[in-house]
Amino acid sequence: MTLDEEDPSLFTSRSQASRASSLRSRIDPPDTLGAKGSQIWPLLLLLILVHMALKLYDLPLNRVIEKRLCDEHYAQHDPSAINRDGSIPEKLCKIDEVQQQLAWLQGIMETTYVVCDFIVTIPFSFIAEKYGTKAVLWVNLVPRIFMSAWVLTVGNFSRVLPTKAIIAGPFLAVLGGECVFQSTIFTLTSALAREYVQRASYFSYVSSITYVVSFVGPALASFTMSQSLWAPFWLNIALLILAIPTIRMLPVPNESLYLAATVPATESTPSEAGPLLPGSLDDPNKYSNAFETPPAGAYQIILRAFRKLGRLVTGRRNFQILLISFFLTALASSDTKLLVQYISKRYEWTFAQAGYMLSIKASVNIVILAFVVPRIIQASISSRTVHGSEVRLNYLGAEASILISIVGVLFIALAAKIWMLLAALIIYALGSALPVFTMSLVKSPLIAFPDSDIQDFSIVMLTKTLGSLVGAPLMTVLWVQAMKAGGLGLGLPYFVSSSIYALAAFVVARLSF
């Protein structure tokens, strides 16, 4: 179905969005990180602190669990392998028995974290409505701090707590995890942007910050855990504590007043008014809360919210297609959680050495997202080669990114030598611009209703989290089977991931212009 075959009310809504965007660009010329762009710096700083803390947690967690499992295995089966000081060389821990248990525990922890995060995303939208997004972000820090503190506890009290007690850490994600955090971040990022080029640049900067941290984080984790296995977790807690005052610095953009001045109130669409999609654009507190609901009973609010979320999805074919692609790419990218274990097992590297390899991959991500993508977008717009066709630019960028990811993941599965893996990781990293283009499509007139980006980004993050929820146990099962197969079979999770990326490329191709 083409655009002109869709519901006329959707076309009217997109026309309003287009007029509003046009008026914005006349009043406020685009800037990337100029005077208005300075408001995004506290948001970027928060991303650095939180994501750096996460990277300092992920890599050494593998070694902590492996160490506990390894100690138990050799104490029972081969005490002679234990040194006089009680330590066991890490290379002796790469046996299948230990690595399979490690995979299961990591898979259970990842699945638990995603499930807890997923089920509280909608409830947290109402907490944001009542107490503001800053309160949600502060609460979001609690499970992150607890998980590092719990690893320190389990790791240092082996005589009191069994290894499986490590699973308790992710349960505190009922206070919010990555889905809650990312949906809030993308909502605030979109609110700070005035028009297409600026918004795409902001999304690119947000993504590049993530990859900058992905470059520095594993290297820092590798270095610090080489000095002391517990140092990364203490650094994690310190960074999260620094994030507390950073949240207070976040701007509260007031775009509703801006839109009210540029779009006549009579152009709002009453059929779409409701608790999650206000019909009026004159509420001065739109972005002081990331999610809007009218005063009503809790049950009625939740019921209306789910009905409205369902209506926002079922009313837009292109949005449905894009959500399917988000699910598939999130499912396919679940293989990245296995990279450290994959490198360590297949090439008999320590986790610290594997961390440095991940940093090389992230360095390519940085170049692509911080320099190449923003310049391509700005050059395309300024040269008018795609002026008025920003949707097509995002579509082509998304398809190209997915196709590159297919090749990169396939090469990872086939890499027999470490230099081959390095080349494969670099190719895979070239597809890292995908979120920039897909998130821009969510905000584009092809999909967005006026004033619906808050809910759209929440739905997107829920969909991505659902993909991760399915991906975590799937990749765990595939990885365990891969270790049983051995040889080329170790690449099984990546063969499957490549197939899922191919399906995502086919789905994105179904978008109607």
Image (cartoon, grey):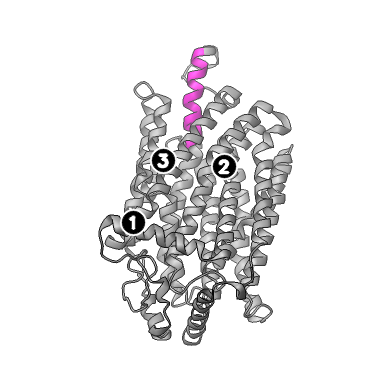
Q: Which residue is mark 1?
A: 302
Q: Amino acid at mark 1?
A: Ile
Secondary structure beneath dot 2 equals: helix
Q: Earlier in the sequence, mark 1 or mark 2?
A: 1
User: Above or below — where is 144 with respect to 513?
Assistant: above
- The residue labelled by disc 3 is 233
> CA–CA distance between discs 1 and 2?
43 Å
Q: Amino acid at mark 2?
A: Gly
Task: Indicate the position of residue 151 as horizontal and vertical percent values.
Answer: 40, 35
**Image-based side of 279 in relation to 431, left or right:** left
Q: Answer few, some or many: residues within 10 Å of disc 2's Cα (few below 14, many 20 plus, some between 14 and 19).
A: many
**Residue matched to label 2:** 355
Q: Position of residue 507 (x, y in %)?
A: 65, 57
Q: From the viewer's perspective, is 225 left or right of 359?
A: left
The quadrant the C terminus occupies is bottom right
Residue 65 colored in magenta in the image: yes
- Does 489 appear above or below 407? above
